[in-house]
Amino acid sequence: MSGHSKWSTIKRKKGANDAQRAKIFTKIAREIIVAVKAGGPDPDNNASLKDVIAKARSNNMPNDNINRTIKKAAGDTDTSTYENITYEGYGPNGVAVIVETLTDNRNRTAADVRHAFDKFGGNMGQNGCVSFMFDRKGVIVIENEDIDEDEITMDALEAGADDIEVDEEAIEITTSPDAFSAAREALEAKYTLSSAQISMVPQTMTELTDPDSIKNMTRMLEMLEDNDDVQDVYHNWDMPEDAE
């Protein structure tokens, strides 16, 4: 699940089964198609495409899949048209939720997203109702496999990082959106990145203590993330370990 939890991306990727991986690949393929149609098939001249390719590789998407999707998107026969639509709302007990989608049918997607909010005790609001509680940042995660903390800190700062947090399990590096691509390229030349993407990072967290609220929030996030049109779900729920 996306959101505040620093290492959730790693945990999800490690635990992903074949069906989950296939769904992740399908969603990334949509991002590749949109990037190619907007800026062309050459990643050296299309920064957005280069970023999506890096995201695909960090999710272990095979190069054949990446290249085939780029070729298809660049061809005259591909009539795929997707638009970015962001939805905002509240989960149980006022948890702030942002849902980023890529869709070819905005009516279907709006209905599906609203249903997920309503079904589990949340409510979908107007654009801007919760996004002011988040900061848009580049987030780069590296698994901490005996990496020297001083060295990675120096490398990250030299690459343009704003902040770095080191945990026994992983290292999270944040950048401004403008500095993200350069920082990612500099760091992936030396380290293996577990994930790297522009994310919505919450400024404050909301804790849930009621078991029913925790169950409903978990199910709502699962329903949203299972939707093919949903690319990312961000929230400010202070998730317990066993909910991830």
Image: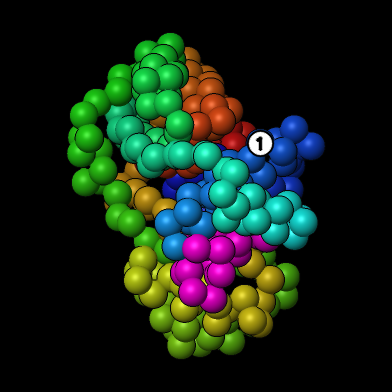
Q: Secondary structure at mark 1?
A: helix
- The answer to whether residue 235 is visible is no
- The amino acid pointed to by label 1 is Lys
Q: Nearer the viewer, residue 82 or 86?
A: 82
Quarter-wise, where is residue 38 in the image?
bottom left
Q: Nearer the viewer, residue 48 or 171?
A: 48
What range of the chain is rendered magenta?
40-59
Q: Which residue is mark 1?
A: 23
**What residue is rendered at 60% in x and 52% in y?**
75
Q: Main secondary structure of the magenta part?
A: helix
Crowding near the residue tagged with mark 1, few <14, some 14–19, many ≥20 C-alpha atoms within 10 Å: some
**What residue is rendered at 79% in x and 37% in y?**
18
User: Residue 195 at what x, y percent from top left?
Assistant: 59, 59
The answer to whether 190 appears left or right of 133 in the picture is: right
Q: Confirm whether the magenta stretch covers residue 54.
A: yes
Q: Confirm whether the magenta stretch covers residue 79.
A: no
